[in-house]
Image (tube, helix red, strand yellow):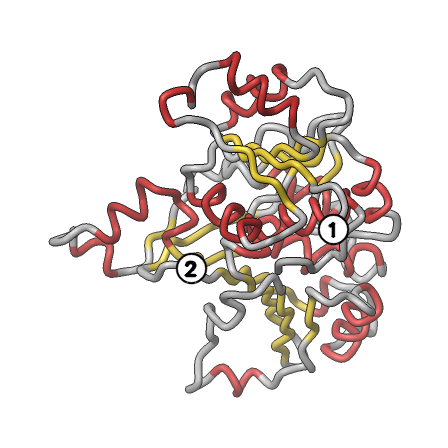
Amino acid sequence: MGKKHVVFVDGQEGTTGLRIHEYLAARSDIELLKIDPDKRKDPTERARLLNAADVAFLCLPDAAAREAVALVTNPNTCVIDASTAHRVAPGWTFGIPELAPGQREALRKAKRIANPGCHSTAFIALLRPLVDAGIVATDLPVAATSITGYSGGGKKMIEEYEAAGRSKTLDAPRPYGLKLGHKHVPEMMAYSRLTTKPVFMPIVGPFYKGLAVSVPLHFSQLKPGTDAAALVRAYQKHYEGERFIRVMPAADPSLAEPNFFDVQGSNDTNRIDIFVFADTQQCILIAREDNLGKGASGAAVQCMNLHLGCDEGLGL
């Protein structure tokens, strides 16, 4: 065994940080640095650990993530930020290796990687291939709905849902982001290449994890001649050879009734499953993932593996 890769997780007590630790703890090629609990907010100790790491994960609120980046002076430290702070910031590389040709090479070279949000990962996986193929115009007004498990809300929301005698209001799905300013929208636009702001409504459900983003479209809005088969072909071409994206065969909408769609069907994987449900006039595109896997910690570890020159799926 050669020299181990040194990794520090700043914010290791949060949901994403804990999951990253789980991925890495069993690996013999990783040395995990840990901060003493009483020094978690000590900038001198945090700076020491951040600069001692080959890779530093930031699992922090946006303001704290910006502060952490300012502490990094070692030019060899690669920062992977799981917050929203740097996802559309100049000089940062977006952490979806499957985004487009050249993205993997950019991630290998990058010292500043912005880990994508859970909702935006699935949305971009649906729209970017169709925009690149000329099927969806960049200025098309798009609407999207995302339903996700409550773990996406972090420790506070998990405690709320799992508390004894919790409110009955938590037993039903809860739409949010109704002021139409969800924090994932800027990256959804930037990396799908859409120039018109999508109407986006996320929903939190009474289950721990699992996420599905759905985008409804009329074929009359798309490139002439587009049908379900053409959509599937575009996805297959874009994602050919990708181990973590699975394009499902064109699905008859009757398959969703009465069987319903399994939002949790990609749980405990680092995979996105893409579905096309369509008739002759309309379609519903769905991308499904584990919001704690490919939607958060799994994506971060995948980017780390790429950057370090490891097998991309190591530990995943």
Q: Helix, strand or loop at disc 2?
A: loop
**Residue 180 location (% of width, % of height):** 48, 39
- In the rendered structure, the answer to whether residue 29 lies left or right of residue 91 reads left
Q: Which residue is mark 2?
A: 209
Outermost top residue: 44
Of 185 and 153, nearer the camera is: 153
Query: In front of the other: label 1 or label 2?
Result: 1
- In the rendered structure, the answer to whether residue 132 lies left or right of residue 244 reads right
- In the rendered structure, the answer to whether residue 262 lies left or right of residue 277 reads left
Q: Helix, strand or loop at disc 1?
A: loop
Q: Residue at x 23, y 60 (%)?
A: 171
Mark sitting earlier along the chain (1/2): 1
Q: Residues within 10 Å of mark 1 (few under 14, many from 20)?
A: few
Q: Is residue 98 above or below residue 194?
A: below
Q: Are marks 1 and 2 in contact (CB under 8 Å)?
A: no
**Residue 32 location (% of width, % of height):** 57, 39
Q: Residue at x 24, y 53 (%)?
A: 162
Q: Residue at x 56, y 82 (%)?
A: 253
> What amino acid type should be assigned to the residue bearing mark 1?
Met
**Residue 233 location (% of width, % of height):** 81, 74
Q: Which residue is mark 1?
A: 1
Quarter of the rendering occupied by the C terminus: bottom right
Question: Which of the 4 image quarters holds residue 82?
Answer: top right
Q: Residue at x 75, y 76 (%)?
A: 227
Q: Residues within 10 Å of mark 2 (few under 14, many from 20)?
A: many
- In the rendered structure, the answer to whether residue 100 lies left or right of residue 203 reads right
**Residue 27 location (% of width, % of height):** 61, 53
Question: Which of the 4 image quarters holds residue 276?
Answer: bottom right
Of 149 and 255, nearer the camera is: 149
